[in-house]
Amino acid sequence: MKILDVYNKFKLTPAKSLGFHLWNAQGEEYLDLYGGHGVISIGHSHPKWVEALQSQLTKVAYYSNAVEMPLQQEYAQKLAAVSGADDYQLFLCNSGAEANENALKVASVITGRKKIIAFKGAFHGRTTGALAATDNPKIQSPLSGELAVEFLPLNDTDALKNALDEKVAAVIIEPIQGVGGVAMPSDGFLHMLSVECKKTGTLLILDEIQSGCGRSGKYFAHQWSGIKPDMITMAKGIGNGFPLAGVLIKNGIDIAKGMLGTTYGGSYLACAAGISVASVMKDEGLLNNAEKVGKYAKNKLEGLANIRKVLGRGLMIGMAFDFPVKALQNFLINEKKMVTGGSSNPNVLRIIPPLTITTKEIDALFEAISEYLNK
């Protein structure tokens, strides 16, 4: 049997990882500025994360949600403390797509409506409902058309007001698009969106799967705008590599028993990982580091030749060039041993490193890109 070949892969086989570095079997060291799709938040193999998982393995590794698990409540309390989202209920699951699928389901059940509004460039997952709200024809399927989803231009207030009515169950939006090329709704647009959703009884879902967990310099990127959405979906960085995801549902939205469920979501090991990540983020001031280093990176990288704009917030950064970046990305990984990411926009190079990164690594990236541009 062979593994199905469905991924475009880097020419790198990690054999060891620590902090923001990877090593292959030959001992070559790579600077990880991509964090495995932004999953590595507190750094590879953080000792407190490793200790938490090892310790839990000696107690209970797994049981289903058929039993009481105090670790889930402990995680909810740690999450509330680091994020400030203490007026939400938490449903734990396994992946970002699953979180979005459940959020869309809740919105439809609560409102009794079927229509969804999403935005051009959106990426919300690969399951049927999440995929229907994803603006990427390359990965959509015939089933995607069964849900009534309307895609609107980002930051177009007139289009939103014309589309949003009492038939819309939910609006789902990323405060910073990841796969979409690090495009952002303005803070003003998010505020207006929140107001308009309240007028029509539409539930507002903020997809924080990549932009959350401190990446923007606040725990959730939408917090820069000051809004309070009805639901927040999260995954990726909250487990630092252990599968963990969740839906935060605003207090006052009643969820009947049986509406949501999962076999593996919120397991003992997942919660142990989540607790350690939340603790490390608070203890090591990683939100402040993401904001500080992110500002430094934006200012530094804006000085590159051929760059049109530096996009994003904190340590979710897109560099928009006036040429396709694939050759640059290959140069960085093959010649400079730096792992970076692309996006659906071929001219945008994306960096979403561990939140422990320092200005020294940003300087090294600047020098490497400058060398490529001056060839």
Image (tube, rainbow, N blue to C red):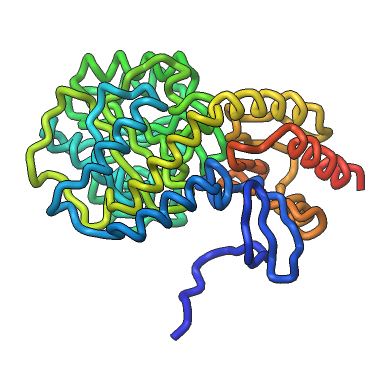
Residue 236 visible in rendering: yes
> 8 or 260: which is nearer to us?
260
Asked which quadrant contains residue 88, the reply is top left
Task: State the count of labels.
Answer: 0
**Relative to residue 218, is residue 370 drawn left or right?**
right
Residue 131 visible in rendering: no
Task: Return the residue found at the far right.
Answer: 375
Give the percent coordinates (x, y) of residue 85.
33, 24
**Relative to residue 101, is residue 261 drawn left or right?**
left
**Relative to residue 14, is residue 135 drawn left or right?**
left
Quarter of the image for the N terminus: give it: bottom left
> 224 or 111: which is nearer to us?
224
| Residue at 41% in and 35% down | 208
Task: Return the residue found at the far left.
Answer: 257
| Residue at 30% in and 59% down | 61
**Relative to residue 333, is residue 189 drawn left or right?**
left
Give the percent coordinates (x, y) of residue 162.
31, 21
Asked which quadrant contains residue 43, the reply is top right
Give the percent coordinates (x, y) of residue 281.
50, 33
| Residue at 74% in and 70% down | 26
| Residue at 37% in and 39% down | 234
Asked which quadrant contains residue 309, the reply is top right
